[in-house]
Amino acid sequence: MNFHANLLLVFLYVAWRFVAPLPISFEKRIFIGAGLFLISKYHLVLLIAYGTMFSPELPFALVFVAGWAFCAFVLLALLTLLADLISVAHRAMRIFGSKPMFTWRIRAGIAILSITMGGWGVVQAVQVPNINHFELVVEDWPVELDGFHLVQLTDLHISRLFQAPWVREVVNRTNTLDPDLIVITGDLIDGTTSARRVDIEPLAGLSARDGVIAIPGNHEYYFDSSLWVTEFERLGMRMLLNEHVVVGQGRERIVLAGVTDEAAPAYGFEGPNLTAALSEAPTGVPKILLKHRPENAEASAAAGVDVQLSGHTHGGMIRGFDLIAAYANQGFVSGRYRVDDMTLYVSNGTGLWNGFPIRLGVPAEITSIRLRTKS
């Protein structure tokens, strides 16, 4: 079933288990139900109004409030389900006999908690992220490159929710790290090139000794990736589309490869091709792969990649949701993973999609990585 049909099922469950039993008049229940239905269909309304649910061209305040309402609705559904499961378990064990557990007071508490957590989660989501510093020891990493400093940005989702001032501050925080190399692993934008041109302009200020290298994510393909590749290159980025570059010289060389996204073929573009990306790459040189989605990491390891940098998952956004996100991404959702002889790092993301803009216990990040030789 598609996204909108699934949300309809979620609404029907909330209407049945949360709204219908409320001890208020029928008219008030209809009013609350209608409001929740409209919130649950937020993305469908955007699709009808703008032709896409990924880029509402509305003022920041409206996108923020709409995101808050939708996130609160999702939390309401989850907490209602949790209350139902607890109630069923208690009844099965006869801990409280036949006394109903899911009372109107519990429902009121769930509503207040959903609204509060939803608002706080959106506030957390729109903050400029902190730096996540760590060192990564790589097998056979050259001594000459010990301490090579790489900064990863990913999933910025520049939109009406993440506008030019936010982007400028991300750029400033990144540049203060004085990295050797900056990489961006996809989903830089939500919107057309004309809608986002002002908001993306600060990206031209990114600065690193070995440059700024990027790949597209799935969201670039929703808005004509070919136009966006041109825009990103205008801003000084080197875009890798199933290809590689060699960074450095002599023993201080790194092969940096990048692939397209799995969404590409649906929009008439070439899908990810690791073989092409590594074709004619020099042997005996460490290989770093930029791949938006972490899935199929085993194939990357088998191809001789030493480090794969990915995003896409947003870290699951809500602590506990990471289990669902991991299931949808072959077990990879946040942080470091050892895949055969390769290290995979999945960033929580620098921003996130405005259609579900929430972070609870899963902070965004600007990722600062020092690559180290194994002693």
Image (cartoon, rainbow, N blue to C red):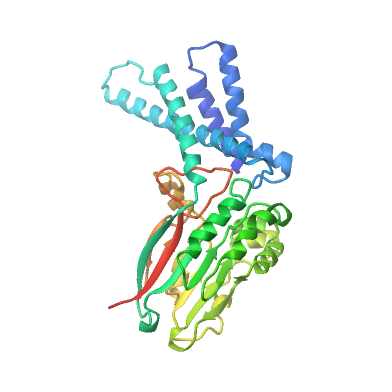
- Is residue 353 depicted above or below 153 in this figure? above
The number of discs equals 0
Q: In what quadrant of the picture does the C terminus appear?
A: bottom left
Q: In what quadrant of the picture does the N terminus appear?
A: top right
Q: Quadrant of residue 61?
A: top right
In depth, the one of 91 and 168 nearer the eye is 168
- Is residue 311 depicted above or below 82 in this figure? below
On screen, residue 108 versus residue 31, left or right, reads left
Q: Position of residue 374 (x, y in %)?
A: 31, 77
Q: Position of residue 36 (x, y in %)?
A: 57, 27
Q: Position of residue 262 (x, y in %)?
A: 59, 61
Please give the name of the residue rendered at 64% of the width and 62% of the height, measured from the top-left corner: 264
Q: Quadrant of residue 269?
A: bottom right
Taking the image as drawn, is residue 116 in sight?
Answer: yes
Please give the name of the residue rendered at 38% of the width and 75% of the height, measured from the top-left corner: 147
Taking the image as drawn, is residue 154 in sight?
Answer: no
Q: Position of residue 19 (x, y in %)?
A: 51, 21
Residue positioned most to the bottom: 250
Residue positioned most to the top: 25
- Is residue 369 depicted above or below 33 in this figure? below
